[in-house]
Amino acid sequence: AAAVEVLASPANASVLLGNPFVRAVHEMPRHGRGDFLARLRRRGFDLLIDPYWSWDLAWARTAGAIGARQSLGLDLHGRGLYYNVRVPAAGLPSLPAAELMLEICRRGLGRPLRSRPAKIYVQPGEREAALRFLDQSGLDIKKPLVLIHPGGHYLEQRWPAERFAETAGGLLRAGNWRVAAVGGPAD
């Protein structure tokens, strides 16, 4: 019954559009962040969950600036200073990102939260636009298409290029797949 709102970077905000479980998506502005965060602070959020677990403290500071009644985050690399619900990093299993965040929430909130398959909610017209784009790119859309995204924000998040090439080659040799690499300007 919670009303969920998400603060996201410009690169990630659009992924949440149309998600029926998210009441609002707030895109972090490139400029004027102080006023923006002050407006969010005045909203008086009950719980803030910071899904970040790297040494970079920018999002932890953002969590502190929003000032929710409870803020949950991983106690790692000094991040715990910004939360009042700290989840120790020691003993966390090695999991994919979404599952790790869910485990951090389970431990911090003391609740048996269920895992669900990830889903992106396609907006009206997006499917048709994607099919047109694929057709114009010369990809045979009658065969299953595998999109490979080799990007990653940090170097340690990136799989070696040879592995992507090996995977794409294997799919192509199997004969029933089309493979395309995707990415953004920073990739």
Image: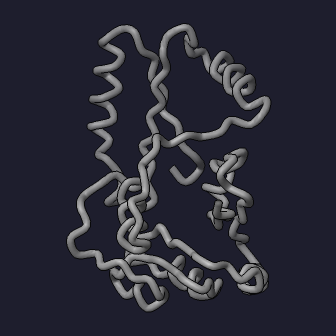
Relative to the observer, which residue lies in front, 48 or 39? 48
Disc tally is 0
**123 horizontally vs 171: left or right:** right
177 and 68: which is toward the camera: 68
Q: Is residue 49 left or right of residue 98?
A: right
Question: Residue 107 location in percent, x, y?
Answer: 35, 70
The spot of residue 75 in percent (x, y) is 35, 81
Q: Could you tell me which quadrant the N terminus lies in?
A: bottom right
Relative vertical location of residue 111 with respect to residue 77 in this rendering, above or below? above
Q: Picture quarter containing residue 175? A: top left
* Residue 186 location, quadrant: bottom right
Residue 115, compared with residue 4, is above or below; it is: above
Which residue occupies the extreme bottom position in the image? 81
Q: Residue at x 36, y 16 (%)?
A: 172
| Colour scheme of the rendered structure | one colour
x and y percentages locating residue 74 in the rendered image:
38, 76
Q: Residue 120's image quarter?
A: top right
Residue shown at 50% from the left, 72% from the top: 50
Residue at the image position 48 percent from the left and 30 percent from the top: 147
Q: Residue furthest left?
A: 91
- Locate residue 2 relative to residue 164 in the image: left or right: right
The image shows residue 22 at horizontal and vertical percentages of: 67, 55
Q: Residue at x 55, y 83 (%)?
A: 70
On screen, 110 above or below 63?
above
